[in-house]
Image (cartoon, helix red, strand yellow):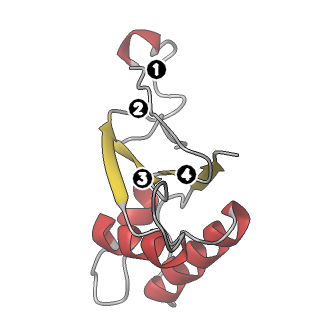
Amino acid sequence: TVSPLASEPVSQLTDKPANRPTGKLNEVEVIQSGGFMLGVMENISEMLEDQTLQLNCGDKVVLYTDGVTEARNSQEELYTLERLIESVKGHGHKPAEELIAAVRQEVYGFISTQGQYDDITLVVMECG
């Protein structure tokens, strides 16, 4: 599945660095949106919704599939949205490509040798 067309509701995490005197990213906003698995239905256009985000220069939008937050470790613990938010907060100051690499490393470090049962898709867009 690919965001925003995912099997579970997909969230967008928006870093908001505007008006931060230090320039550090320390706020993540979770925006809920519905989604559907790709290829299951022929036409899903009536089920999609538009959302408008007001972004400032340097803001990032992170799209992810449920495979990220539902990734499991050997103790059957989920990676969770909370861990994803903390990862984005910790690496949000990095360029989009490096942010993806850092989150990916954390997710795969979390699941360690546990098999992957779902896609792990992460897309980061940065307002320039």
Q: Quadrant of residue 102?
A: bottom right
Query: Counting residues from the N terminus, which is met first, the one under dot 4 or under dot 1?
Result: 1
Most distant residue in the front direction = 21
Q: Nearer the viewer, mark 2 or mark 4?
A: 4
Callouts 1 and 2 close, C-beta under 8 Å: yes
**Residue under label 2:** 36
Q: Please name the amino acid that badge 3 sits on.
A: Leu
Q: Which numbered disc, 1 or 3, marks the residue closer to the eye?
A: 3
Lower sequence index among marks 2 and 4: 2
Q: Position of residue 100 (x, y in %)?
A: 63, 67
Question: Could you tell me how far apart the alpha carbons at marks 2 and 3 are, in whole angstroms?
Answer: 19 Å
* Mark 2 and mark 4: Cα distance apart in space: 26 Å
Camera-side residue of 33 and 29? 29
Residue type at mark 2 is Phe
Q: Which mark is residue 59?
A: 4
Which of the two residues, 128 or 18, is positioned nearer the viewer here?
18
Task: Indicate the secondary structure of the residue bearing disc 4.
Answer: loop
Q: Earlier in the sequence, mark 1 or mark 3?
A: 3
Q: Amino acid at mark 4?
A: Asp
Q: In the rendered image of this protein, does residue 95 appear above or below residue 64?
A: below
Q: Regarding mark 1 in the picture, which secondary structure is present there?
A: loop
Q: Nearer the viewer, mark 1 or mark 2?
A: 2
Residue under label 1, please give it: 41
For marks 3 and 4, the one nearer the N-term is 3
Q: Which residue is mark 3?
A: 13
* Marks 1 and 2, the one that precedes in the sequence: 2
Disc 1 and disc 3: Cα gap in Å?
A: 27 Å
| Camera-nearest label, 2 or 3 | 3
